[in-house]
Image: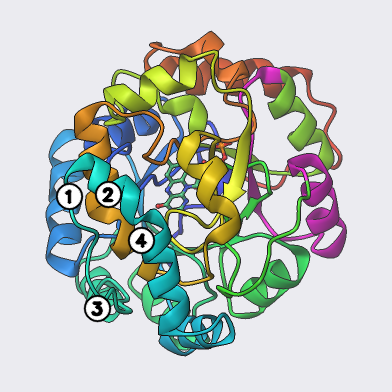
Amino acid sequence: MIDRVLPSRLRRPVIGAPMAGGPTTPALIAAVGEAGGMGMIGSGYLDADATREEIARVRAVTGAPFGVNVFLLDPADSAAALAAAGGVAALDRYSAAIAPVADRLGIALAEAPAFTDFDQAATLAALVQDPVPVVSFTFGIPGAGVVRALQEVGSAVVVTVAGVGDARRAMEAGADWLSVQSAEAGGHRSTTTVAERPDEIGTVELVRAVRAALPDAQFVAAGGISTPADVAAVLAAGADGIQLGTVLLRTPEAGTSALHRAALADPRFTESRPTRCYTGRYARALVNGFVAEFDPLAPPAYPHLHILTGPMRGAASRAGDVEVPPLWAGSGWRESDAYAGRPAGEIVAELWDRGSRSATRARPSLPGSG
Ligand SMILES: Cc1cc2nc3c(=O)[nH]c(=O)nc-3n(C[C@H](O)[C@H](O)[C@H](O)COP(=O)(O)O)c2cc1C
């Protein structure tokens, strides 16, 4: 049997989060991998061809293992959430509400946004045809057949879960390991239905609950981890490793926009909050003018709102208008100031080495770890 990539087999069990939409670059993946962790391509918004190209770019710059993250979107689930919220009329109402923002930027909102799964089936077929070390899923739990097909070609299958129930279901489907993501995480929360309102559980509490429910599962903890003390706390609670997003956004290797980088350092922002207002699905961002005004109005229409607001978000970023675009940030964005501008490899090494040294482990190391 091929040895699949597990957190315990990494020199430093630190996952560089897949950050779709620009922040994750081949250079960031290479830097995290060469520091002994593992980076992930965020293929969520890429079609199969673009995913293949991104894989080739990563292979061209590093021999370290890496993963590809895939969004699992279910058309029936999206349709049910939208129907319950009032259907197309709810979309039209939201579109009318945010239209003045688009007008101000001199652009039109995308018209008649419809469901897309971003080429999910073709992307999975491409990953079976040309395997990568790890495939992770977000927004859903793959069927046992998909899990098996990926494992048969040597890929480890990871599922991003937001709670104990989904963690159990993912392990039952045959996942090799989990990314356990709390409400503190920057970007989207990986709940498995569009309609649900995610809970507000913190990372340490969630890690403890998942470890109690699944004593033998391997998992990394994600959400608000930006200091060695955070690392020590999640390891003590039972995690096998960590997944970092926000603290890597201001590394030189990341593709984060200048506007987003500046906002993360800007004292005018004092709060981050999960909101549906950009994509229709809850995602944690700094509270700027757009979030403050439109968070209460946004219907559970994913990925419709992602498509609707796309041109507006792009235009606002190009115009340098920080009050409109999504400024994704986990709860630890302020603490991550200490690492702003530092190379990703240094952050991975320092957070892991200092954090794991001071952690009192909740249980002995797994075989093969160390
Ligand atoms: C800008 C940004 C984009 C993200 N995009 C994705 C993604 O495409 N797929 C995914 O599984 N998680 C995504 N996440 C969530 C991360 O995988 C991870 O759970 C989160 O960053 C951890 O919390 P932290 O940001 O506080 O470190 C994203 C996070 C950020 C900040």
Could you tell me the amino acid type at mark 2? Ala
Secondary element under disc 3, as helix, strand or loop, is helix
**Measured Cα–Cα span from mark 2 to mark 4:** 14 Å
Pointer 4 residue Cβ closer than 8 Å to ligand 1? no
**Measured Cα–Cα span from mark 3 to mark 4:** 25 Å
Could you tell me the amino acid type at mark 4? His
Label whose residue precedes the other's in the sequence (2 or 4): 2
- Please give the label number shown on residue 297: none
Disc 3 marks which residue?
125
Secondary element under disc 1, as helix, strand or loop, is loop
- Quadrant assignment, res 217: bottom right
- Magenta residues span 202-228
- Please give the label number shown on residue 102: 2
In depth, the one of 303 and 132 nearer the eye is 303
In depth, the one of 206 and 35 nearer the eye is 206
Label whose residue precedes the other's in the sequence (1 or 4): 1
**Measured Cα–Cα span from mark 3 to mark 2:** 38 Å
In percent of the image, x 26 and y 76: which residue is there? 112
In depth, the one of 324 and 332 nearer the eye is 324
Label whose residue precedes the other's in the sequence (3 or 2): 2
Please state the horizontal and vertical placement of residue 313, each as a whole percent of the image: 29, 45
Badge 3, how many Cα within 10 Å: few under 14, some, many 20+? some
- Quadrant assignment, res 109: bottom left
Disc 4 marks which residue?
306
Could you tell me the amino acid type at mark 3? Ala
Label whose residue precedes the other's in the sequence (1 or 2): 2
Nearer the camera: disc 2 or disc 4: 2
Q: Does the magenta-highlighted stretch encompass residue 182?
A: no
Disc 1 marks which residue?
107
**Seen in the image, is 29 located left or right of residue 4?**
left
Nearer the camera: disc 1 or disc 3: 1
